């Protein structure tokens, strides 16, 4: 609603806390890391799907992991979760290494189309568009900042004819899912404890973030909870982390229920088409590829598409639902002419206001000795490696485009 996001980062290359040369050391050190959420014994088991399920959930990312968890609470429903990528690994646990996960096998590695208005510093003016190809989806690649969104957006979605999407309707579900571990937030009416998704501040910070929040107060903004009653203001960032490690939706919602008998999870299984009855337009199955072999699985009740902002509309169009002219141009039979994908939007980031700090307080790689920093993270769940991709502070500020609310 005209409110812009301002992020404060401690250094331009903050994700370089450890350097790539430290990754083998991390892998060895994790052998002794008994307290973090990564545990080889808690790995989700990759199963060969059966022929038929009550529900098929396509995409095990930020949404699909939650849907699979909730559906399997009904013990007489059996659910298949199809995920196009592998499981998480030790490196995805480390908050400060978030930037290193992009352009790896855990990323779909999408590129934007060339434009003369953005991505001017990239080859052929094409930005990378990271999307998680891994159990947990983009919640495994992102910088873990916990921001629910603006209440006016939810209310607007409901006004478009979507009952149940108003802010007052969705807030109880945010609270239900949350396990907020910051005492000053956990007990107010906008936050919850005991849910699956752990939310907290990074256990380590530089003096810069306190200065950042103080500067916002000097500008006339409040130091406030941006997920509370009013969003405009400054705060130390909260993230989806648990005891210093990333808390993806896979860790939050799938690992605790991995032994449910009515849940099967198939990894490295890329859906290629939703099977839809051309007369009733009811989805009855999914075509997918696993180990290079095309397979089909059928749904007795529903197919739930939760493959993200790019893959979900793509899969709908591959299945014959989308703009008819486009589908015909690429040789896909049209089942339903709908403007699928036509309102796709991304948030634009501007790498501005970069400046040097003349005191040795920011996160710069050569200021930290690799072994002590790593062992502090592994043993104590503390130190620079717990910072949310290097980002410490967050603010929502008014612009001339903001309305009075």
Image (tube, helix red, strand yellow):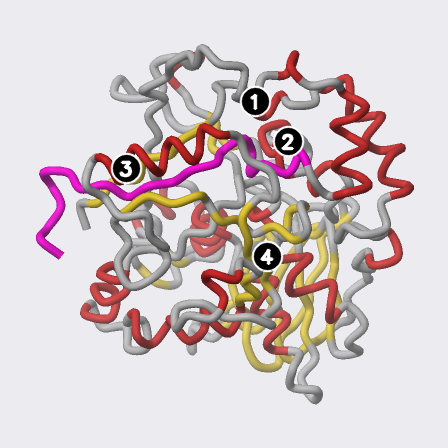
The mark lying in front, picked from 4 and 2, is 2
Instruction: Please tell me which residue is depicted at 44% across the width and 34% down the height of the picture.
Output: 209
For marks 1 and 3 on the same chain, the one whose residue lies earlier in the sequence: 3
> Which residue is the site of mark 3?
216
* Gap between marks 1 and 3 measured at Cα: 21 Å
Look at the picture and state if 339 lies above or below 158.
above
Query: What is the span of residues highlighted in magenta in the rendered image?
Result: 383-405
> Which residue is the site of mark 4?
59
In the image, 389 versus 343, the foreground residue is 389
* Gap between marks 3 and 4 measured at Cα: 40 Å
> Which residue is the site of mark 1?
363
Q: State which quadrant residue 198 falls in.
A: bottom right
Instruction: Please tell me which residue is depicted at 69% across the width and 63% down the height of the picture.
Output: 296
Q: Secondary structure at mark 1?
A: loop
Question: Looking at the rendered structure, which numbered label has been put on residue 384?
Answer: 2
The mark lying in front, picked from 1 and 3, is 3
Work out which residue is located at the far bottom of the displayed protein and give it: 76
Q: Where does residue 108 sit, x and y in percent of width and height?
A: 58, 37
The mark lying in front, picked from 4 and 1, is 1
For marks 1 and 2 on the same chain, the one whose residue lies earlier in the sequence: 1
- Residue 221 sits inside the magenta stretch: no
* 1 and 2 marks in contact (CB < 8 Å): yes
* 3 and 2 marks in contact (CB < 8 Å): no
For marks 4 and 2 on the same chain, the one whose residue lies earlier in the sequence: 4
Q: Secondary structure at mark 4?
A: loop
Q: Where does residue 395 sit, x and y in percent of width and height?
A: 33, 41
In-image side of 270 versus 122 (left or right): right
């Amino acid at each position: 609603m005209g409110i812009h996001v301002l992020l404060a980062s401690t250094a331009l290359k903050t994700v370089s806390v450890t350097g790539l040369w430290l990754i083998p050391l991390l892998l060895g050190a994790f052998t002794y890391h008994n307290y973090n959420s990564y545990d080889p014994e808690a790995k989700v088991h990759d199963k060969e799907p059966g022929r038929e399920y009550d529900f098929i959930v396509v995409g095990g990312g930020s949404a699909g992991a939650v849907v699979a968890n909730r559906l399997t609470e009904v013990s007489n429903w059996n659910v298949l979760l199809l995920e196009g990528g592998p499981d998480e690994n030790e490196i995805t646990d480390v908050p400060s290494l978030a930037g290193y996960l992009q352009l790896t096998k855990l990323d779909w590695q999408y590129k934007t189309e060339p434009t003369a208005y953005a991505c001017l510093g990239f080859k052929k003016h094409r930005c990378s568009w990271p999307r998680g190809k891994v159990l947990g989806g983009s919640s495994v690649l992102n910088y873990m900042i916990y921001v629910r969104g603006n209440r006016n957006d939810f209310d607007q979605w409901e006004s478009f004819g979507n009952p149940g999407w108003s802010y007052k309707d969705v807030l109880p579900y945010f609270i239900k899912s949350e396990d907020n571990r910051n005492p000053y937030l956990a007990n107010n009416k906008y936050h919850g404890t005991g849910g699956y998704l752990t939310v907290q501040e990074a256990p380590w910070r530089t003096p810069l973030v306190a200065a950042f929040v103080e500067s916002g107060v000097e500008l006339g903004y409040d130091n406030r909870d941006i997920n509370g009653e009013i969003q405009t203001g400054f705060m130390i960032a909260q993230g989806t982390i648990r005891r210093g490690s990333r808390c993806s939706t896979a860790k939050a919602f799938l690992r605790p229920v991995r032994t449910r008998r009515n849940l099967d999870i198939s990894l490295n299984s890329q859906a290629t088409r939703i099977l839809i009855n051309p007369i009733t337009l009811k989805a009855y199955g999914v075509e997918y590829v696993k180990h290079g072999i095309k397979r089909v699985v059928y749904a007795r009740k529903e197919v739930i598409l939760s493959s993200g902002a790019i893959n979900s509309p793509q899969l709908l169009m591959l299945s014959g639902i989308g703009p008819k002219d486009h589908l015909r141009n690429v040789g896909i039979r049209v089942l339903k002419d709908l403007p699928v994908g036509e309102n796709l939007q991304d948030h634009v980031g501007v790498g501005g206001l970069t400046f040097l700090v003349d005191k040795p307080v920011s996160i710069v790689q050569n200021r930290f000795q690799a072994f002590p920093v790593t062992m502090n993270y592994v043993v104590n769940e503390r130190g620079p490696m717990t910072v949310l991709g290097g980002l410490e502070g967050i603010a929502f500020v008014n612009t001339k485009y903001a309305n009075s609310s």
